[in-house]
Image (cartoon, grey):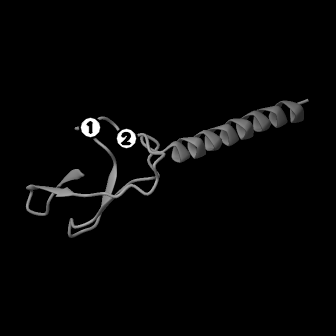
Amino acid sequence: MVEVPGADGQPTRLVIRVKNPNLDLPELGGTVPVLVNRRRTKAAFDLDDPSISPDARRKLGEQRQKANAAAKQAKFDAKRTER
């Protein structure tokens, strides 16, 4: 169960059924990233947020590795062409 601000400003409690048991959820009372519809009747965990999703953390790490490899390659190519 999560509590989100309602349209009137009052907190609204919504039940989220977890389809992915691999989430790293905080302790009771902690803050979690959720996606909520406009009418505040349905909510789902934000699976693209690396703070709770191991899959999102893995994808973020892969992106960083690719960026580092591209930077190293560009630096190597620049040194090679300056001679």
How far apart marks 2 and 1 lie (CA) works out to 8 Å
Residue 39: x %, y % from top left? 20, 70
Label 1 neighbourhood size at 10 Å, few (<14), some (14-19), many (20+)?
Answer: few
Write down the residue under mark 1. 30
What residue appears at the point 63 percent right and 44 percent down from the top-left corner?
A: 63
What residue appears at the point 73 percent right and 41 percent down from the top-left corner?
A: 70
Q: Secondary structure at mark 2?
A: loop
For this view, does 7 lie left or right of residue 26?
Answer: left
For this view, does 23 lie left or right of residue 1?
Answer: right
Single out the residue that lies furthest toward the bottom: 39
Label 2 neighbourhood size at 10 Å, few (<14), some (14-19), many (20+)?
Answer: some
Q: Quarter of the image holding residue 74?
A: top right
| In the foreground, 71 or 82 | 71
Q: Secondary structure at mark 1?
A: loop
Write down the residue under mark 2. 25
Q: Are marks 2 and 1 in contact (CB under 8 Å)?
A: yes
What residue appears at the point 83 percent right and 37 percent down from the top-left corner?
A: 77
Mark seen at residue 83: none
Quarter of the image containing the C terminus?
top right
Residue 7: x %, y % from top left? 13, 63
For this view, does 13 lie left or right of residue 73?
Answer: left
| In the foreground, 60 or 76 | 60
Residue 66: x %, y % from top left? 69, 42
| In the foreground, 48 or 64 | 48
Q: Is 16 rendered above or below residue 24? A: below
**What's under tag 1, amino acid-wise?**
Gly
What residue appears at the point 47 percent right and 43 percent down from the top-left corner?
A: 50
Mark 2 or mark 1: whose residue is earlier in sequence: 2
Single out the residue that lies furthest toward the right: 83
Q: Is 32 rendered above or below residue 15? A: above
**What's under tag 2, amino acid-wise?**
Leu
Residue 33: x %, y % from top left? 34, 48
